[in-house]
Image (spheres, rainbow, N blue to C red):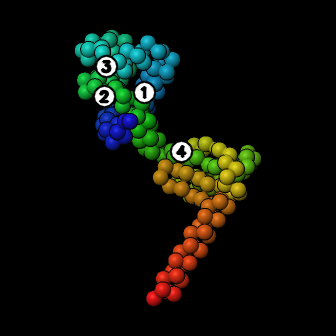
Amino acid sequence: MVDIRVARRYARALFEVALKQERLQQTGDDLNNLRALMTQSDELRAFFYSPLIPRDRKIARLREALSAQMQPHTLRLLELLVEKRREKFFEAVCEEFQKLQEAHQGIARATIESAAPLTEAEQNALVQKLQQSTGKTIIPTFEVNPDLIGGVRVQIGDYQIDGTLRGALDRLRDQIMLEIERRGARVAS
């Protein structure tokens, strides 16, 4: 299990350096390209994540292979991960960096669940409404969840909007249970 706080610190440091050097987009591209390369190449992935390969050898090979095509501060991040034996944090650092970059650019990712598939017009209207209310560009992911019975649930980061029938029924149940407990307490006293 990767400690997200550690990954967040590395991502934050890289983000601040990239922002200061006005190389935010290039740094994001470096990370995305390297992630794609790791996904495609089993050999590179095995080399990078192997605890058996000496650190100095790993760093030398990374410099040799990537220095011409990568921002120096991005390469330095990889070197730091290797030096500290924290290669396992690479994916989480990439994800956290992407979140920071998107937040800086006014982009928010939203997961939108509905009981039945939404039409394109409904999807567009919902995204438009979310963009107006958040002031951010929304990148939506639409999912169908029949358990919701009806309505829509939107998750943007830690913020959730539950406009589903299932959510309404759950809230009603909770209110009824609270009222029963409160009346039971009154009868007992």
Q: Quadrant of residue 91?
A: top left
Percent across and percent down for residue 148 are: 67, 54
Q: Nearer the viewer, mark 1 or mark 2?
A: 2
Q: Nearer the viewer, residue 46 or 17?
A: 46
Q: For the residue marked with disc 1, what is the amino acid?
A: Leu
Q: Nearer the viewer, residue 160 or 169?
A: 169
Q: For the residue marked with disc 2, what is the amino acid?
A: Arg
Task: Work out which quarter of the rendered image holds the C terminus and state it.
Answer: bottom left
Q: For the residue marked with disc 3, what is the amino acid?
A: Pro
What secondary structure is marked by label 3? loop
Q: Nearer the viewer, mark 2 or mark 3?
A: 3
Question: Is disc 4 in contact with disc 1, using a CB cutoff of under 8 Å?
Answer: no
Percent across and percent down for residue 67 are: 34, 16
Residue 12 seen in the current view = no
Which residue is under mark 3?
51
CA neighbours of label 3 inside 10 A, class few (<14), some (14 to 19), many (20+): few
How many angstroms separate mark 4 from mark 3 (CA)? 35 Å
Among the two numbered marks 4 and 2 on one chain, the one whose residue lies closer to the N terminus: 2
Q: Nearer the viewer, mark 4 or mark 2?
A: 2
Which residue is under mark 2?
86
Mark sitting on residue 77: none
Percent across and percent down for residue 143 are: 65, 44
Q: Residue at x 61, y 70 (%)?
A: 172
Q: Residue at x 70, y 50 (%)?
A: 146
Which residue is under mark 1?
31
Among the two numbered marks 2 and 3 on one chain, the one whose residue lies closer to the N terminus: 3
Figure check: 65 above or below 102: above
